[in-house]
Amino acid sequence: MAGQRNRPWGALRHYGGLLAPRGATVMRMATERNAGQRLRRLAHAASERAGERRSPSPQRMRTLTASPGGRLHWAGVPAPALPGPAGAIVRPIAVATCDMDPLVGLGASPFPLPLHLGHECVAEVIETGERVTSVVAGQRVVVPFQINCGRCPACLAGRTANCTAVPPVSMYGFGIGGGHWGGAYSERLAVPYADGMLVPLPPGIEPATAASVADNVCDAYRHVAGYLPRLLEADAEAEVLIVGSVTRHTLFSGSNSLYTALIARALGARRVTIVDRRPAVLAHAQRLELEVLQPADLRRRSPAALVADISAHPAGLRLALASTAPDGVCTSAGTLHRSARIPALAMYARNVTLHVGRAHARTLIPDVLDLIAAGRLHPEVVTTVLDSLDNAPEALREHYLGGGIKTILTV
């Protein structure tokens, strides 16, 4: 709703929510493989903090920290050391909000606070290990938000989000829930597998333009790129339907819907429609000359061949599936709800394909950068706030509380 302000969760509500079933589900997934490695990382981090209190490190940096109650502040912490001969140290120079960041920053997610925020960035390489060959100091790179080695069977098959060299859901910006890898709103970020992770930024692309490629733009790309060419070959007028927020109030930001629409158009779709209840998202989509609808309008519409569910809500998933044509495809960004009902019989009768999952960001980043370099995709038109990284606490607080679409902060 226009003018609606989000409210942060206080400490009691936040920590109580961690005991809810979804919190247990997240922790179970995070420890179902390589649990010992995750626990060793956490123990090492705790040991570092204890040692820091006894003898402060001379090499320090600032990092943005989120605490319960929506409190955002710069904290002084030890600067990360080079993570071995295959690693690198980078300096984030353009950092973007992810659509999930308001939930994390306001304490409404199953990721325990406090934590160091940020997981979408373009950075400058500061230092590399002796075994790194793909990047050099001074180079600008996109840093995928997921930690991956680039060499295990999963990575070699392109499934970098499920790298077996690290525990599940290892990623920047999610605190202990993501493996305690640090956050991108920092002066330094340690990259453990530089050759496997870092992607050089092509000449001519501004860091702010590519900052969200680390996650949200790649997530938008995977909703359509694997399906749209085949659908358009069969029917040049095949519609791409994007289901955003279906509720009056959501803490999720709205950039992913817009990125998905722009990518569908860049890949040749003539009919692209966004469904959403947020006036700001609908207004922005109209400025981008996209067709917009309210969820109730879908009752009078024919189903679409390709539907992207970016609602992050069980009701949105059901609406997306109900709007998928026979032999069509519905892709879903998933939800933080523990479970969701689906119309299984109707899907069976229509032969509908449903794909729920996360983007394999490192695998997709080069393809997305190629679209940008060719002038076919312009992520910058989705950005609603461009500000200085020095203003991060104030700019992000307004983004979280005010329901912003995409905020990008630069040095």
Image (spheres, rainbow, N blue to C red):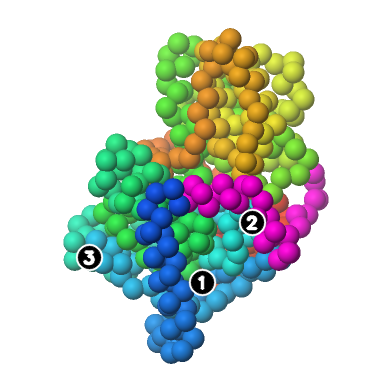
User: Given the image, on which type of amino acid does mark 2 rest?
Assistant: Leu
| Mark 2 → mark 1, Cα distance in angstroms | 24 Å
- Residue under label 1, please give it: 63
> Please, is residue 145 above or below residue 338 in the view?
below
- Residue under label 3, please give it: 85
- Number of residues whose C-alpha sits closer than 10 Å to that of mark 2, classed few (under 14), some (14–19) or many (20 or more): many
Foreground tag (2 vs 3): 2
Query: Does 55 sit left or right of 279 as displayed?
Result: left
> Please, is residue 263 above or below residue 169 in the view?
above
Q: Earlier in the sequence, mark 2 or mark 1?
A: 2
Q: What element carries label 2?
A: loop
Q: Where is residue 309 in the image (x, y as percent from the top left)?
A: 60, 31
Q: Is residue 179 visible?
A: yes
Query: Does 197 sit left or right of 229 as displayed?
Result: left
Q: What element carries label 3?
A: loop
User: Is residue 22 rendered magenta in the image?
Assistant: yes
Tag 3 near tag 1, CB within 8 Å: no
Foreground tag (2 vs 1): 2
Q: In which quarter of the image is residue 293?
A: top right
The numbered dot on residue 18 is 2
Q: Which residue is drawn at 75% across and 38% down?
A: 247
Q: Which residue is drawn at 42% across and 18% down?
A: 230
Q: Which residue is drawn at 35% across and 56% down?
A: 141
Tag 2 near tag 3, CB within 8 Å: no
Which stretch did the figure color magenta? 1-30
Q: Where is residue 154 in the image (x, y as percent from the top left)?
A: 31, 40
The numbered dot on residue 199 is none
